[in-house]
Amino acid sequence: MKYLMKSLLLAIIMISQIPAQNAEKIVADMINQLGGKKTFYAMKNVTYNVEYKDPNTPMTLDSKEIYVFDKERSYAEYSEHSMLGEKGKVTEAYDGENVWIKFDGKISNDKQANSIARFWRKTNYYWFAMFFKLQDDGVHLKHIGTKKIEGRDYDLIKVTFGEDIGDAQDTYVLYINKKTKLVDQLLFTIIAFNITTPELYKFNYETIDGIKIPTERVEISSNWDGEIIGKKWATTYWTNIKFNNKIDMTIFSK
């Protein structure tokens, strides 16, 4: 009887662990399909241009971005910044600890401007490196089911974060294509702006230096079933992507 109870308990534990293991394996396969985590971080840094347009707000952000993967340093010079551009030409940086923002080359101590700069420095870096960061400490993965969309089969992976991970703990649901092993779309919240109903992202990829990067992204409001409830799509385009550049590290200093 005691042996039977131990066997049943072990079986229950093993069954309870299957979804987590399955989620981790699916995500690991996805990262490998992108080119691999080691290959990505071996690039050391990246530069690129990004243009974001949201006709619903409306909002336009157009910048040249520079990221150094060590300490997740981030720098941007904006040619258009509809949230802050009326204050002058915008430059933002995150040095691995602190964020600063300049207008027309002069440091600003405006709290709201610095808060917005922190959001975009952390957010833009995260969106570029996100899929490779899904194996970071404090990231929780859960397989929550499967779904067929337009004839394609998907594994649905819910992503949540520990309390001390990042400035805000958003929730994501990844739709990982069972055939290609890529994330075709995802749902996510934006807790920093009190947006708890999800946005839907869809991606198109390019391969650059052996790494698959989602260089085109469209976004619209949805529900947690992935059904579109918004009226207009926002767009993001990443262009001129170059890895492993020679970076002047003084750009991250005030």
Image (cartoon, grey):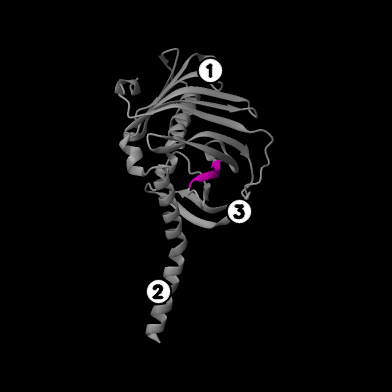
> Which residue corresponds to mark 1?
85
Can you tell which of label 1 and label 2 is closer to the viewer? 2
> Which residue corresponds to mark 2?
10
What residue sits 58% from the left and 31% below the top?
Answer: 235
| Alpha-carbon span between mark 1 and mark 2 | 60 Å
| Alpha-carbon span between mark 1 and mark 3 | 43 Å
Badge 3 marks a residue whose secondary structure is strand
> Which residue corresponds to mark 3?
148
Badge 1 marks a residue whose secondary structure is helix
Can residue 165 be spotted in the picture? Answer: no
Point out residue 170 in the picture as x, y percentages from the top left corner: 51, 44
User: Amino acid under label 3?
Assistant: Lys
Span of residues in magenta: 182-189
User: Amino acid under label 1?
Assistant: Gly
Label 1 close to label 3 by CB (< 8 Å): no
Can residue 73 be spotted in the picture? Answer: yes
Label 3 close to label 2 by CB (< 8 Å): no
